[in-house]
Image (cartoon, rainbow, N blue to C red):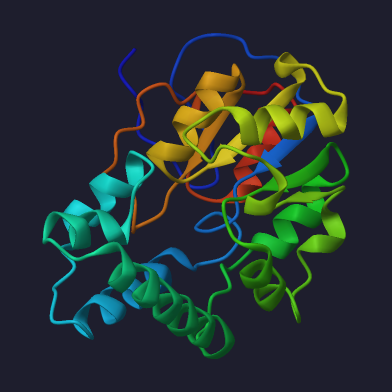
Amino acid sequence: MQERLATAHMAVAVTGEDHGVKEYVLFDHDGVLVDTERWYYEAGERALADIGLTLDKDQYLRDMSQGGGTWAQARAAGVDEETISRQRSVRDDYYQEYLRTEAIEIEGVVEALAELSRYVRMAIVTTAKRVDFEIIHEKRRIRQFMDFVLVREDYMLAKPHPEPYLTGLKRFGADRAETLVVEDSARGLRSAVAAGIDCAIVRNEFTKAQDFTGASYRIDTLIELKEIIRGLT
């Protein structure tokens, strides 16, 4: 079905199927609840620049959609694993510096979560490391709306494998049909689809060119989820 153009604050159903009322929402984190993805890229770009390499953004996004990232280009350039390990630590330091100093809030997120919490139970399923997640949420109000958070250390296989979202389902004791995943990346979408859960893709300028075939909905802001979870789309 050809996707219709979204109007302001109106969720767009990509398929014509009736997906029903939702009781649970599993949120991705980076790019959905906080604006961190470009800073993760810039931290990797900076770490590679330290050893004389340029990180190609388009290739980086393609690698990320397949579950790779910064170091795929480093390996392709012949960088050895010892150097990659060292620069990964450097990248992590740069990233945490950005998390502490840059504005990463997404306008309207807290207000949307407060409204959605009237209708559904919510949780976060993220590939972020626990230390990064804790830095991000030291002074933010997002966690108060969540039943639980799953970070990278809480499951074995990362997105696009279905394990992260299947783990979220199990924690809730929820059925797939009554659950919605909210993502901004092709990798996360593939994880949700593989887990058999409907997925809404929220617009993110950093990932907007990725392939979102398989998404059930497209939205511009989180408040549009209200229509979806109440079965109004």
Give the camera-side residue of 186 and 6.
186
219 horizontally vs 109: left or right: left
The residue that appears at 27% across and 47% down in the rendered structure is: 63
Q: Residue furthest top?
A: 17
21 horizontally vs 99: left or right: right
Q: From the top left corner, tell me how far across and down residue 83 is, in percent.
A: 29, 73
142 horizontally vs 59: left or right: right
The residue that appears at 55% across and 80% down in the rendered structure is: 99
Quadrant in the picture for residue 79 = bottom left
Q: From the top left corner, tell me how far across and down residue 197 is, in percent.
A: 62, 21
Give the camera-side residue of 206 and 187.
187
Q: Residue furthest bottom?
A: 101
The residue that appears at 59% across and 40% down in the rendered structure is: 182
Q: From the top left corner, tell me how far across and down residue 140 is, in percent.
A: 74, 75
Q: Is residue 208 visible?
A: no
Give the camera-side residue of 154 and 95.
154
86 horizontally vs 202: left or right: left
Q: Is residue 112 visible?
A: yes
Q: From the top left corner, tell me how far across and down residue 203 is, in percent.
A: 43, 49
Looking at the picture, does residue 15 appear above or below residue 218? above
Looking at the picture, does residue 60 appear above or below residue 177? below
The quarter of the picture where the N terminus appears is top left
Looking at the picture, does residue 157 appear above or below residue 39? above
Quadrant in the picture for residue 90 = bottom left
